[in-house]
Amino acid sequence: MKIVIAPDSFKGSLTALEAARAVSEGINRVEPEAECIEVPMADGGEGTVQALVDAHQGEIVHREVTGPTGERVKAHFGDLGDGRAVIEMAAASGITYVDVESVDPGRTTTYGTGELIAAALDRGAEHIIVGIGGSATMDAGVGMLQALGYEFKTESGEEAEFGGGELGKIVEVKTGNVDERLAGTKIEVACDVSNPLYGPEGAARVYGPQKGAIPEMVEEIDENMKKFNERIFKEEFGIDAQQVSGAGAAGGLGAGFSCVLEAEMRLGAEIVSEANELKKYLESAELVITGEGQIDSQTVHDKAPRHVTETAKEDRPGRPVICIAGSLGEGYRKNYEYGLEAIFSIIDRPDSLESIGVRAEKLLADTAENVMRLVGLSREQV
């Protein structure tokens, strides 16, 4: 029996590959001859670099870069060893680096994300995948572009300072010093939101308060985004960012990628499954098992379990797909609507989250064993 095991990571406990191996162990207790194919998954957020590095026997590369408030931070990216690199912008410009109670979100920058892109180019990357979840920034990608050689000038001719608070002052961009290697590089951006750059559903108004912006600052940055779109994206690059789906993602970083670097914006789980060749492994699989740390109503929004399920059923609608999750969150039953046959939690008794995390590998293997015993019983009765 061929079984594809394609889970996301169990955040804080297991990487996607570790989770897949635990499921394989549980299955093989019951079906020693089962062919278990492990395909680590992710949705473009935390765990994406690790999932792709594990799937391709790549390398985690460490670099010190500029953090969101200008300090130096230790970041990393993945080198897949075949001309592809994977970056999580949160590793350089993420919300975990700031105290939202005291940070000035009008001064945070994506400069470090640009430094990671440059570091990937230094290692020969020709195709870069960037996950842009978990940002601390609202600078429309200006910092990232500055790190790559773009110069953003104010009316006085000076280089603009960091942050979304400066966007309204920028009147010109100079490209004479842009890293020439970008011209031959394919960039894909894992983006799971469709927010426009500015306006009621834009970067500042929707995500600004989560990053520490008070109401007055939200309005200021929103207006700055609008001005920047008119003066730079439209006039200098010929693209109206407001018409680009996902331009407002990561504080407008989506706009910087799509309008300036001509990056392709795609669903994160779609990018990862394509890179890991999920469809190829599914071709003759009889059963598919997916999973994540917590399955809930948010999982239906193009998270890894949904993508795995829908991909598995494209050519074989009757093929069973089972999800094993750390816990079952509010609204988890919504996930039956897109085709999951069954959902199981690994929790075996009342316990603390810390203890469950420590025992996660064993709990996952034990649950997979029980799932497989049920599958075996069903096959015998058929």
Image: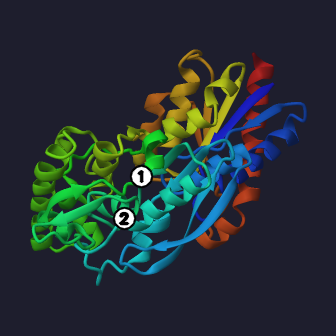
Residue extending furthest front? 176
Q: Quadrant of the N terminus?
A: top right
Circle 1 — which element?
loop
* Mark in front: 1 vs 2: 2
Is residue 293 visible in the rendered image? The answer is no
Query: In the image, 160: left or right of 44?
Result: left
* Residue position for label 1: 330
348 to 376, vertically: above or below: below
Q: Residue furthest right?
A: 32
Label number found at residue 376: none
Picture residue at 70% right of the left edge, 44% below the top: 55
Q: Would you name the residue on which mark 2 appears?
A: 110
Q: Amino acid at mark 1?
A: Glu
| Camera-side residue of 158 and 189 | 158
Q: Position of residue 380 (x, y in %)?
A: 81, 21
Quadrant of the image occupied by residue 213: bottom left
Answer with left or right where residue 342 lies relative to residue 243. right
- The front one of 10 and 159 is 159
Kind of residue sitting beneath label 2: Thr
Frontmost residue, 3 versus 138: 138
